[in-house]
Image (cartoon, grey):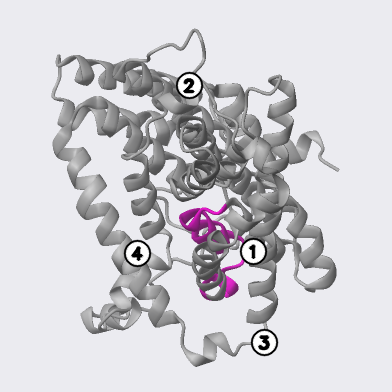
Amino acid sequence: MITLESLKEIFQGFTSLFAVDPKFAVARLGLIALGFLLMYLGRKGVLEALIMIPMGLGMATINAAVMFFDPLNPANTARRVGNLFVEPQAGASVDSMQNAADLMTILQIDWLQPIYTFTFSNGLIACFVFMGIGSLLDIGFVLARPFTSMILALFAELGSFLTIPIATTFGHLTLKEAAAISIVGGADGPMVLFTSLKLAPHLFVPIAVVAYLYLGLTYGGYPYLIKLMVPKRLRSLPMYPPKKQVQYSAFEKMVVASVMCVALSFLLPVAAPLIFSLFFGVVVRESGIKAFQDFIGGPVLYGSTMFLGLMLGILCDANTIMDPKILPLLLLGCLALLLSGIGGLLGGYFMYFVSGGKVNPVVGIAGVSCVPTTAKVAQKVVSKDNPHAVIMPAALGANISGVITTAIIAGIFCSLLAKFAG
């Protein structure tokens, strides 16, 4: 049962605001406002955009994403406040280090180990990938159909929720382990990496391998799922743009992305690194800083993806694959994606009836948030039955909403279960 205390643990950005000296709370709010002002002045060309836009969003987000930490010193029982961006974590002591050679031993500088240590096992590579994804997203698709997009995204999280009781009952996993594998249902690889590091670090490697294996394999089955659940008559249904469709400017999109970034960081500080990375990419796209967009959407995204794939392949050694825990995780990961696909199509039917037959039910599969794979799957299936039916804009809206929804759900899981689950 969710109580007031559990809500305080989930939404720590707000709770921490009232847990410190009021002058610090006022300073946090003032710095958030200053961050937005710097972004505005950078966007308008009054100040240097290359510096002010990333600095402003970083300033606003870091002051929103304040949360509680266990004390570094076990003798001190008082919880401290900080953030996940630069704060030292419990157990981060290097008291045993005597010289530079010890540092090399601690950091494990050997061939690909630095890539794993510095980017993979701490979630940094997930943030880089999310940043690159953000730079490719046009949130105008969401703003064009906000209600439809968010409803479809929520339905498509069915696997993220139903897999938890199934995993705890039949998979004999703890609640944290079940939540870590269930987030595969959100079909967002970086989010799976991030969540498993927070909730089940001992299963991080197999869950990461499972996630990326099935994110590739299961999508091959989604067209068959669509044909099974949606008759050809409905698959052929064309979708038309809203009659009073508003065209949003790049500046308006940038404002929406910035406000969403800070608001979600306030609510879910534990997921703030990924939230910030995603929306920073969106802000860079809409800010007109082409040099940053080319860098983030090119070398950062593709370099991170390359090393992510390389590390996942290297981690698939016999010891990992033969681990007895792997088979249940494989099955649960596949089940989570299947349930999310079913949920998305049920959401498509829901919107079909609510809209009076104006929404093609197939668009619901795009709520499963692998951008833009599931949107392309939806359009491809529809095009085979009706080459003139275009559902891609609506599908991309659901797709992008799915990314945001998965981040919110992962943040809630991490906040709630870190406190109340063993």
Q: CA distance from mark 3 to mark 2?
A: 46 Å
The reply to whether the C-beta atoms of the residues labelled 3 and 2 are less than 8 Å apart is: no
Callout 1 environment at 10 Å: few (<14), some (14 to 19), or many (20+)?
many
Is residue 340 something one can see in this rendering? no
Residue beneath label 2, please?
143
Instruction: Please give left or right for residue 307 compared with residue 123 in the image.
Output: left
Circle 1 or circle 2, nearest the eye: 2
Part of the protein shown in magenta = 187-205
Q: CA distance from mark 1 to mark 3?
A: 15 Å
Magenta highlight on residue 317: no
Q: CA distance from mark 1 to mark 2?
A: 31 Å
Q: Earlier in the sequence, mark 1 or mark 3?
A: 1
Main SS class of the magenta portion in the image: helix
Dividing the picture into quadrants, the one containing residue 218 is bottom right
Where disc 4 sits, the SS reads helix
Which amino acid type is shown beneath numbered disc 2?
A: Leu
Residue beneath label 1, please?
181
The reply to whether the C-beta atoms of the residues labelled 1 and 2 are less than 8 Å apart is: no
Q: CA distance from mark 2 to mark 4?
A: 33 Å
Where disc 3 sits, the SS reads loop
Where disc 1 sits, the SS reads helix
Which amino acid type is shown beneath numbered disc 4?
A: Thr
Which amino acid type is shown beneath numbered disc 3?
A: Pro
Circle 3 or circle 2, nearest the eye: 2
Q: Nearer the viewer, residue 11 or 369?
A: 369
Residue beneath label 4, please?
119
